[in-house]
Image: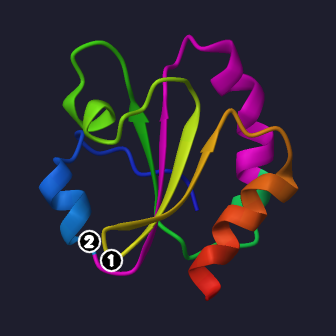
């Protein structure tokens, strides 16, 4: 499933979302973010119904600060607004799949 292209949601909107969700914080110019795209897409291919929201993060962006994001990409797995797992600069598909498997518990 392609990441949603929507205006940046508020923290309250994220917290109120039912079910599973993958938030991806990064920046379009970030080399680490671009390099991670193929492993993120590969892992998400095994979770085709999982909503994925890519957030363009940066200075002054409130949503990233509310999640204490410091490095990109940062992936946050949520269920019913509760953080289950967090990956900072994931290196492998397996790392991402392990985080996503927290949704299955």
**Magenta stretch contains residue 29:** yes
Disc 2 designates what residue? 17
Q: Is residue 81 above or below residue 7?
A: below
Tell me the crowding category of disc 1: few under 14, some 14 to 19, or many 20 or more residues within 10 angstroms, Cα based: some
Give me the C-alpha separation between circle 2 and circle 1.
Answer: 6 Å
Residue 25 appears at what percent x and percent y? 47, 35
- Left or right relative to 16: residue 83: right
The residue depicted at 34 percent of the width and 42 percent of the height is 67
In the image, residue 102 above or below residue 61 = below
Q: Which residue is drawn at 54% across and 23% down?
A: 71
Q: Which of marks 2 and 1 is nearer the N terminus?
A: 2
- Toward the viewer: 70 or 13? 70
* Rendered position, 38 above or below 78: above
80 lies left or right of 103? left
Image quarter (top left, top right, bottom left or bottom right) of the N terminus: bottom right
**Nearest the eye: 51 or 62:** 62
In the image, residue 87 above or below residue 44: above
Q: In the image, which residues are magenta? A: 18-41
Looking at this view, name the residue that lies furthest to the bottom. 105
Q: Which residue lies under the disc numbered 1?
A: 80
The numbered dot on residue 67 is none
Which image quarter: residue 13?
Answer: bottom left
- Asked if residue 88 is among those painted magenta in the image, a careful observer would answer no
Give the position of the C terminus as an image quadrant.
Answer: bottom right
Q: What element carries label 1?
A: loop
């Amino acid at each position: 499933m392609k990441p949603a292209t929507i205006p940046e949601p508020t923290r309250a909107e994220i917290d109120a979302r039912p079910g599973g969700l993958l938030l991806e914080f990064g920046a379009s110019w970030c080399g680490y973010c671009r390099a991670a795209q193929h492993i993120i897409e590969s892992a998400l291919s095994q979770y085709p119904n999982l909503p994925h929201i890519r957030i363009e993060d940066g200075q002054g962006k409130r949503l990233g600060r509310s999640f204490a994001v410091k490095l990109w990409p940062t992936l946050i797995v949520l269920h019913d607004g509760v953080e289950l797992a967090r990956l900072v600069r994931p290196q492998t598909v397996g790392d991402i799949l392990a985080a996503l498997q927290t949704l299955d518990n």
